[in-house]
Amino acid sequence: MLSKDNESVRPPRLKPGDTIGIAAPAGPFDSEKFMKGKTVLESMGFQTFFDEGIFQKHGFLAGTDIQRANQVNRLFADPIVQAIFCARGGYGSMRILPLVNFKIIQKNPKIFFGFSDISALLSVLYDQCGLVTFHGPVVTTLANATEKTLTALQTALTSPTALELTPRNGKVIKPGVCSGLVAGGNLTTLCHLVGTSYTPNLKGKILLLEDVGEMPYRIDRMLTQMKLAGCFNEIAGLILGTFKECGHLNEIVEIFSHIFEDKDIPILAGFEMGHGEHNLTIPMGLRATLDTDNKRLLFHEPATVS
């Protein structure tokens, strides 16, 4: 496992004409949405590449575990591929974690994009390899993505400047300022990694959380489990994305206020990331400052290198 003293590994920045490889590490997907999302990436000036095997179905998975893991391993190893997008989330990423070749990934750092169930890979790729990854759209959600979502994605892929995110309707749950590496993603996915050898390392991190379709008591239950497991003992701060179809926002805020009432950390809600209308791209494993006074998350350096 990566030492806590190791520096984050930023992947190479994309240029027009570069090739984005597409993998399906989780659930099967709608082929029409997939082709529309692929076209969106190509309209940005990139080429796309994928193996026909991504269209396989194995029950509620996009192929067997070894097939899905091999897609990820091959794309990291392939020199013609400069970035990797996931076709869809759903479920299944955690099943392939023992089959992912982290040595290949360490030798070939690349942009890796996804959210929801893909949070398992985002978390582990940093903890195991130090790789800065990207919490943002999957190919199938690009089919109907908002302009705001697409602009944020393209900026993250190509910009030589550090990103700054200021939620339009930011809500301060606890005031303060902190700095740390950004980590996290989908609450349900991260919670199910607790107790495994891939338990997220959140010490000193600014934790990002979002979810969809979970009743408030389930949100409370997952947060309580992670708290009892010690996951939140030394986090630096907390940012909340969209909790779509999880109850009224005030109820979600109340749950987080209660769970973290004993923590003297800044907490800012209202980030447009996750399963909501907009899904803005956020680098994971990159150092940033969370400032609730100015309601912003400011990264210290660009997420990619030239």
Image (cartoon, rainbow, N blue to C red):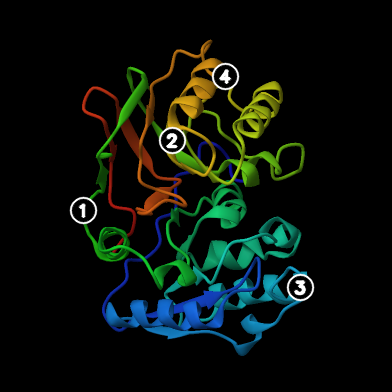
Q: Residue 92 carries which label?
A: none
> Considering depth in this image, is 291 or 209 the residue closer to the camera?
209
Q: Can residue 24 be seen?
A: yes
Compare marks 2 and 3 and give the one earlier in the sequence.
3
Q: What is the spatial separation of the Cα atoms under label 3 and label 1, in whole angstroms?
A: 38 Å
User: In the figure, 267 relative to 140: above or below?
Assistant: above
Q: Can residue 79 be seen?
A: no
Who's the residue at 50% across and 82% down the image? 32
Q: What secondary structure is found at the residue carrying circle 3?
A: helix
Location of mark 3 (residue) = 66
Q: Which amino acid does label 1 sit on?
A: Thr
Q: Residue 161 carries which label?
A: 1
Q: What secondary structure is found at the residue carrying circle 2?
A: strand
Who's the residue at 51% across and 23% down the image? 256
Q: Position of residue 155 (x, y in %)?
A: 25, 61
Q: How many marks?
A: 4
Instruction: Please say if the residues under marks 1 and 4 sit with CB atoms less than 8 Å apart.
Output: no
Location of mark 4 (residue) = 259
User: In the figure, 265 relative to 290: above or below?
Assistant: above
Location of mark 2 (residue) = 240
51 sits to left or right of 32: right
Q: What is the spatial separation of the Cα atoms under label 2 and label 3, in whole angstroms?
A: 34 Å
> Considering depth in this image, is 225 or 300 the residue closer to the camera?
225
Q: Where is residue 302 in the image (x, y as percent from the top left)?
A: 28, 52
Quarter the C terminus occupies: bottom left
Q: What is the spatial separation of the Cα atoms under label 4 and label 3, in whole angstroms?
A: 38 Å
